[in-house]
Amino acid sequence: MKKDIKNKNLIFSVIVEKDKDGYFAECRGLQGCYTQGKTYEEVMKNIREVIGLHIEDRIERGDFIASSSGQSDVSLTTFSLAVPCHVS
């Protein structure tokens, strides 16, 4: 008898940084999941693929896939800090 396969949606936090060469993306919740791209769209496509391959590999090895809970505990903020500087 064939098993029914159901999909489960997991949410992963991804950090995307822009530099002079393009974009870098990292999913810290999954060790080794990082990539780069010339555009934001390209790096997002690439990180989805990397995460998908990582999950597939873990499923094939019978590893436990962590629940998405706790993944949204990431926040990003900016602040202003006055620092002394010399004015000539």
Image: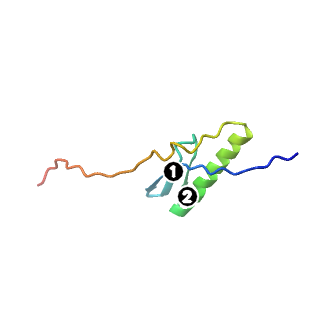
Residue 13 x/y as whole percent? 51, 49
What numbered label is drawn on residue 63? none
In this view of the protein, which residue sits in the foreground, 24 or 44? Answer: 44
- Dot 2 amino acid type: Met
Q: Which color scheme does this rendered protein use?
A: rainbow
Residue under the image location 45 percent in, 44 percent down: 73
Image position of 83 (left or right of 72): left
Question: What residue is shown with label 2?
Answer: 44
Q: CA distance from mark 2 to mark 1?
A: 9 Å
What numbered label is drawn on residue 14? 1
Question: Mark 2: which secondary structure?
Answer: helix
- Dot 1 amino acid type: Val
Residue 18 x/y as whole percent? 44, 56
Image position of 21 (left or right of 57): left
Dot 1 surroundings within 10 Å: few (below 14), some, or many (20 or more)? many
Is residue 5 visible in this depiction of the protein? yes
Residue under the image location 56 percent in, 45 percent down: 68
Residue 39 x/y as whole percent? 52, 63
Q: Residue furthest right?
A: 1
Residue 7 x/y as whole percent? 69, 51
Question: Mark 1: which secondary structure?
Answer: loop
Which quadrant of the rendered structure holds the N terminus? Answer: top right
Residue under the image location 23 percent in, 49 percent down: 81
Q: Are marks 2 and 1 in contact (CB under 8 Å)?
A: yes
In this view of the protein, which residue sits in the foreground, 36 or 69? Answer: 69
Residue under the image location 53 percent in, 47 percent down: 27
In this view of the protein, which residue sits in the foreground, 33 or 13? Answer: 13
Above or below, comparing residue 52 to residue 61 in the picture: below
Image position of 52 (left or right of 87): right
Which quadrant of the rendered structure holds the C terminus? Answer: bottom left
Is residue 39 visible in this depiction of the protein? no
